Image: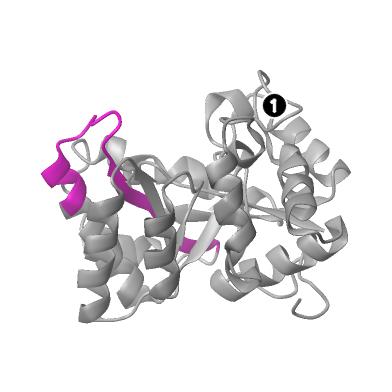
Amino acid sequence: MLIDSHCHLDFPELAADLDGVLARARGAGVDLMLTVSTRVRRFAAIKAIAEAHENVFCSVGTHPHHAAEETDVTVEELIELARHAKVVAIGEAGLDYHYDYSPRGVQEKSFRTHIAAARKTGLPLIIHAREADADIARILEEETKEGAFSFVLHCFTSGAELARAGLALGGYISFSGVVTFKNAEHLREIALSAPRDRLLVETDAPYLAPVPMRGKVNEPAFVAHTAARLAELRGVSGEELARTTSANFFRLFNKVPRTSRASPQSAA
């Protein structure tokens, strides 16, 4: 059984056929999904999807693209929203210097707000990092000194230095369909060296469909292709990779009940 540890079921590309998306995920052996918040002010839509489906959980947070739109989001508000039973993570939050849709200082302030909420709730932080490796590492190191918190570097496309820094601080790394792309050899090297107990898989659907589904709208069912490529890369069976990443998911997102359908029988 597989888990899609990061998707966006509220985005129009998936929401328009949500029942079909979930059915195809089940058919592909994907029994649990984490649909991730990008705007706190649109959290109600995320929450409704998670409430309506037993095998869907959610997060609450502001994507760095939208940090300038949601400067009023506070630690206290995130903590309050995170009390909901289906909210199992904070984020996604972080830094994106590729588009710079929000000023970098605003992104950093929002990032630190989300870190504080993760620390105070005990929920893991889902981190978005794009072309901001040095600042992400710096902030994580500074904030860890203020108190530990758990986190995942999601849809990892950064360099080896950020991978090492994140792992040294106890973080997890999640790989998306990008790891299947022809020009992603450096990423496959990082995926090969990542500790087996810190490894997750995701789609980031509806974006970044893996080979052989390139050009299509990505959806949770396609995480099976990413998992298969990672299993091949690491020299393990698909079943072992699924057990390992599922066990890692439940360890990190420990608010998800172990009775969930994708819960492994034992840690891998």
Instruction: Indicate whether 121 appears above or below 114.
Output: below
Q: Which residues are magenta?
A: 86-108
Furthest-left residue in view? 105
Question: At which x and y percent is residue 90?
Answer: 40, 60
**Number of dots carrying numbers:** 1
Question: At which x and y percent is residue 244?
Answer: 73, 68
For the question of whether residue 216 can be seen, the reply is yes
SS label for mark 1:
loop
Q: What residue is at 68 percent from the left and 20 percent from the top?
A: 216
Magenta stretch encompasses residue 105: yes
Name the residue tied to disc 1: 17
Q: What residue is at 35 percent from the left and 69 percent from the top?
A: 118
Report the coloring of the rendering.
one colour
Callout 1 amino acid: Asp
Instruction: Indicate whether 251 appears above or below 207.
Output: below
State the image quarter where residue 209 is shown. top right
